[in-house]
Image (cartoon, rainbow, N blue to C red):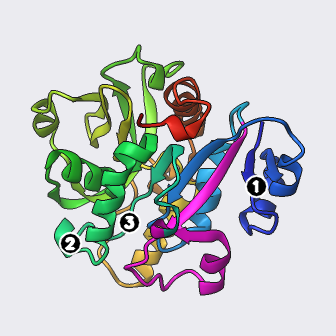
Amino acid sequence: MPVIIPDNLPAKETLLLENIFVMTEKQAKRQDIRPLQIAILNLMPDKITTEVQILRLLSNTPLQIEVTFIHMKSHNSKNTAGNHLSVFYRYWDDIRGEKFDGMLITGAPVEHLPFEEVDYWPELGRILKWTKTHVYSTLHICWGAQAGLYYHYVIPKYNLSKKMFGVFPHRATRPHIPLLKGFDDTFYVPHSRHTRNRKKDIDGQSNLEILATSPEAGLCLAASKDGRQIYITGHFEYDRDSLKDEYLRDKNKGLKIDLPQHYFPADDPHQKPVANWGSHANLLYYNWLNFYVYQVTPYDLKKLGD
């Protein structure tokens, strides 16, 4: 089954060109099935690119999925047209009475700030608290993962001496859990961040467990033991050229930036980057939707939290 999107969402054309199975709202209404309700809190500046990346992964499942895009009321997004936000996004205040099978909280380019200095931190805190009663399983990505770990468990982030930037090999520390079902012994994940979480801080939490790490990139996956909160420090959702675009953007701005590691053949930025994480990205999202959402949420979402 496809992911259900608004009839005129710009991501639709990109996904169709990639032969991704999507369905418009009009088509979905003709099917007698309850779609999974997935909320996406998109904190990224380029929201349209992030929409495509996430919808691409959510579509790789036999389940029908209906997405609700959310943006922050307490933050003025300068990189996405206001018309796009008004048509395709809702404020959390408008949906706080609803319940969702699953939710994704993206990263955001605010790592340099303490959490409390982010202008929308109070609102994000209210949303994170709300997910515990109104969402069955929440997937936190990159800074979204660090924010979730800090809010729920007071686990701090630490500055790195230089940006963790590239595609790194990882191994599962809990290879037999459903989230990593079908994963190879070694799998690759893009990272792009200036901060990190420390393993010892997570080990000290009785309700958290580390699922995958990298000798170079450190923590990659952690989750609450009931699967209701999942934290990803990397970017499974990235496109082939995402790291290349970030590298060129910073270089053109005159910023100090190293080449992404393990990314360009022979470290030559003129060559086509190697994309070796896509199959595991699709598998991760498939496993999350199947084992941590579809198999366990009540058919009547009103009963969630009862």
Q: Is residue 254 magenta?
A: no
Q: Does the rendering let one see residue 275?
A: yes
* Residue at numbered disc 3: 108
Q: Residues within 10 Å of mark 3 (few under 14, many from 20)?
A: some
| Percent x, y of residue 229 | 35, 38
In this picture, residue 203 sits left or right of residue 71: left
Residue at position x 32%, y 58% in the image: 143
Q: Which residues are magenta?
A: 64-93
When asked about the image quadrant of residue 295, the answer is top right
Q: Position of residue 206 (x, y in %)?
A: 15, 27
Image quarter (top left, top right, bottom left or bottom right) of the N terminus: top right
Q: First in sequence, mark 1 or 3: give its number.
A: 1
Residue type, label 3? Ala
Query: What label does residue 147 carry, if any?
Result: none
Residue 142 can be seen, yes or no: no
Q: CA distance from mark 1 to mark 2?
A: 34 Å
Question: Callout 1: 10 Å neighbours few (<14), some, many (20+)?
Answer: some
Q: Amino acid at mark 2?
A: Leu
- Give residue 276's quadrant in the image: top right
Task: Identify the amino acid type marked 1.
Answer: Leu
Give the residue number, with chain letter if any, for mark 1.
15
Name the residue beneath numbered marker 2.
113
Of residue 121 and residue 127, the one placed in the foreground of this image is 127
Decide which of 220, 116 is in the foreground and name it: 116
Q: Secondary structure at mark 3?
A: loop
Residue 302 occupies quadrant: top right
Q: Considering only order in the chain, which callout, 2 or 1, is on the residue closer to the N terminus?
A: 1
Between 47 and 195, the one lying in front of the other is 47
